Amino acid sequence: MNAKTKKKIQKVWKVIWHYISLFLISCFVLLPYYWMIVTAVKPTEEVMQSPATLLPSRLSFTNFTKVWSSIPLATYMKNSMVVSLTATVVSVIFATLCGYSISRYIRKRAQRVSFVIMLVSQLIPGIVTMISLYFIMFNMKLTNTYVGLVIAYVVWAVPFCTLMIKSYFDAAIPVAIEESARIDGCSNFGIFWRVCLPISVPGIISTGIFAFITAWNEYMWASIILSKDKLKPVSVGIYDFIGQYSANTKMAITMTAGIIITIPAIIIFAFLQKYLISGLSAGAVKG
């Protein structure tokens, strides 16, 4: 066996092991979702069967009709959608303006210190600030309101979103384009609005996806600040349902609700994945 053939065989085995590794990792990641779907479509008598079965003996979709009568799921999803979309829009607006400013105009030491403080803030666990934030919201009478939720989500999302969009401005938009617009008589805001903003759509969309998923999945703050059932988002509402009836007695319905509440995130990712990939890849590689 010559060296060329040996090298070719090694390359083939490398590709095979690469795909085997991807397959095993994918199975490990997707196993909880598979178990959630299988439990939702199992007959009632098989849900708590021991030992558990990997495949149902027959498919039963009655849980998908029961879930709407057992849980006010439509109300919970409406609350989550309103809060998540509002927080996403506000976060993206602030993050885009701040990220562009840091990318293009941060020159002085004081400005750099503010940027470092923003970076350091991401190292602080969110649970540390919840007590003080709760008393601020309580004194401002923002508990049991959408506004209190949105403000907290924006405060937590803006720093990281700013870093994301700043990286995109640094890597994907050459300064020469802005200089050309400035020579043509465009103002600083005009350069941002007419030149940089249209080009940065993939970065803005990827940032917005992150902000939306963060707000949609958040549980801790919503459970602290909200006590009215009609205002609770889906993450808190599902957990309250489990606590009220216990996970064992309503396992199948809980799993069915879990499937339904993941649909919005899946739809968003399915339609915007090309912008997400291009936005993240452009922000990761400079030049």
Image (spheres, rainbow, N blue to C red):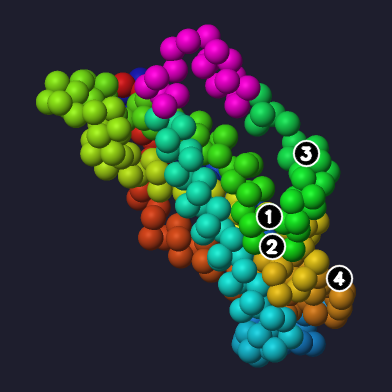
Residue 254: image x %, image y %?
73, 74
Neighbour class for label 2 at 10 Å: few (<14), some, many (≥20)? some
Residue 287: image x %, image y %?
31, 21
| Helix, strand or loop at mark 1 | helix
**Circles 2, 3 touching at the beta carbon (< 8 Å):** no
Residue 214: image x %, image y %?
60, 50
Q: Nearer the viewer, mark 2 or mark 4?
A: 2
Neighbour class for label 1 at 10 Å: few (<14), some, many (≥20)? many
Indicate the amino acid at tag 2. Answer: Thr
Q: Which mark is on residue 148?
A: 1
Tell me the distance, in whole angstroms, between the alpha carbons under discs 2 and 3. Answer: 19 Å
Residue at 75% of width from left, 36% of height from top? 125
Tell me the distance, in whole angstroms, between the alpha carbons under discs 1 and 4. Answer: 25 Å
The residue singled out by tag 2 in the image is 145
**Circles 3, 1 touching at the beta carbon (< 8 Å):** no
Residue at 25% of width from left, 34% of height from top? 190
The residue singled out by tag 4 in the image is 243
The residue singled out by tag 3 in the image is 129
Residue at 51% of width from left, 38% of height from top? 161
Residue 277: image x %, image y %?
39, 44
